[in-house]
Image (tube, rainbow, N blue to C red):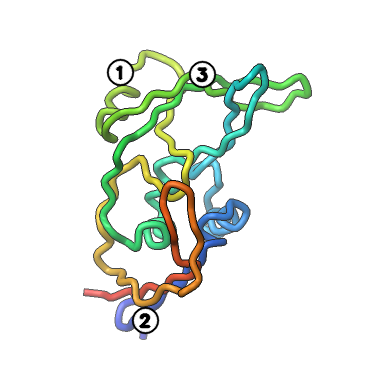
Amino acid sequence: MDKYKTGTRYVIVDHAIATVLDKFDAVATLSGSSRKKFYDVYYLPQDGKLKPVILFYPEYYRSLLIRLYNFDGSQVTPKSSVVISYQEKVSREGTPYKEITSSQSFPNYKEAEAYISSQASGNYKIVSTNALISPVPLEALKHYKLIHSSDNSIVQPGVGSISEVKIFEYVAD
């Protein structure tokens, strides 16, 4: 008997696995992928120095883990989508890195995609600096239902409080 076709299963997600990057890296690796599919470190020139910044890609927000924990499986319509352009460089020590050369905000994801498509050359990415604010639209997940959120919550800048642990029930058709 296949429990995934005939029964119910639960998904338990906590703040650390969904937002602490080292733990998310482990999930990506176990799924046969790499963190670079979901996010990467870029460097932003600021006051004559390069400041590291983590930028999250659309695939991060499209992952089931993030759709459940960050958005409770609900539909998401972003308020804006940001496109960066960057150059791949090499430090004096021989370490490759990505330096942000520009950033532009668009009122929606389609306009951001259209902008990237219209570029003749260069490196462009749709990104977000906040793991909890998606730059891409997401449809509601039909087969997952939030059944428990812990009383303990964590305050997230720009988002508010989010429960530390959430449990979802998978409900088959």
**SS class, disc 2:** loop
Q: Name the residue under label 3.
A: 101
**SS class, disc 3:** strand
**SS class, disc 1:** helix
* Spot occupied by residue 72 in the image (x, y as percentages of width and height): 35, 63
* Spot occupied by residue 98 in the image (x, y as percentages of width and height): 58, 26
Q: From this viewpoint, which residue is outermost toward the right?
A: 93
Q: Which of marks 1 and 2 is in front?
A: 1
* Spot occupied by residue 164 in the image (x, y as percentages of width and height): 50, 67
Q: From this viewpoint, which residue is outermost toward the bottom?
A: 1
Q: Which amino acid is tagged 2?
A: Asp
Query: Could you tell which of marks 3 and 1 lies nearer the N-terminus?
Result: 3
Against 97, residue 173 (above or below) is below
* Spot occupied by residue 21 in the image (x, y as percentages of width and height): 58, 51
Q: From this viewpoint, which residue is outermost toward the top?
A: 120
Which image quadrant: the N terminus?
bottom left
Q: Residue at x 65, y 24 (%)?
A: 50
Q: Which amino acid is tagged 1?
A: Ser
Q: Name the residue under label 2.
A: 2
